[in-house]
Amino acid sequence: MVGALGLLNAQWISAQVVYRFNQPAPLTNELLVSTKSPEPQAGPQLIIPKIGVKAPVVFDEPSVEEWRLQLALRRGVVHYGSTALPGQVGNSVIVGHSSGQIWAPGDYKFIFTLLNKVSRDDKVIVDYDSTRYIYNVTSTEVVTPDNTAVLYQQESKPMLTLITCTPPGTNLKRLLVHAEQISPKFDLTTQLKTPESNSPVPTQSLPASASSSLWQTMRSWFQ
């Protein structure tokens, strides 16, 4: 238990130190203006310059079953099945670990550890289908896991919501970061609309970073 706690603390402290002493360089015009992905050979990816996040986005897991989501999270952050895709009118939801199971496979267990540092007017970038979508953060909030309204929001423009568990190491609540697409410029006459088949599947709780939190797992060792 002490070893697991030490490793979690080391990961969290390391992320905080890197963020504090290595503030990212200002975004270049090329990064913000281009609507074509500069890396067409690469797969879909999520970039959050403020906190140094660059991770693949898994779009090939349509199921919202928790165990399937956990498997997909081993490969990066995950587009939540049946929500809008980038470039579509609606809310595109992407989930990621803030502190996944330390011993679990995958390289993205702490990818959203610093998501709470993201604030209004920060930028989020999604490269998808050879196009660079740039979003401006409009708000953040912390909600309970049963507050699933975000998955069913009816939007009249392309929006993005990032979701992770908070505080890190628990699955008590969810941190939501909401952002609006600013590039390519939204045009209702040409913008892709969310297909009816992409209507969110009803669920009783928001996705979690892990089926059980680190603290729950460690408590079970002594029961």
Image (cartoon, grey):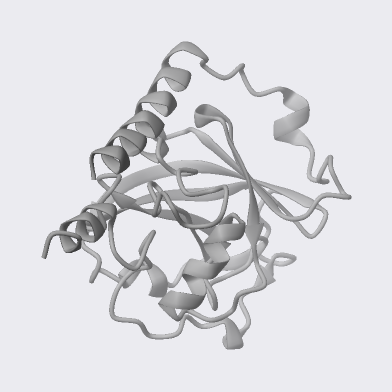
In the picture shown, does residue 193 fall above or below 159?
Answer: below
Q: Is residue 157 visible?
A: no
Farthest right residue?
41
Q: Is residue 220 visible?
A: yes
On the rendered structure, is 219 left or right of 57? left
Q: Position of residue 121 (x, y in %)?
A: 46, 33
Q: Residue at x 47, y 79 (%)?
A: 64
Taking the image as shown, residue 173 lies to the left or right of residue 153, namely left
Task: Relative to 215, say whether 202 is above or below.
Answer: below
**Closer-to-camera residue (121/118):** 118
Tell me: 110 left or right of 192: left
Quarter where residue 195 is shown: bottom right
Residue 1 % position (x, y): 23, 45
Left or right relative to 147: residue 184? right
Which quarter of the rendering shows the C terminus? bottom left
Q: Nearer the viewer, residue 49 or 186?
A: 49
* Residue pictured at 45% horizontal, 81% vertical: 65
The residue shown at (45%, 21%) is 19
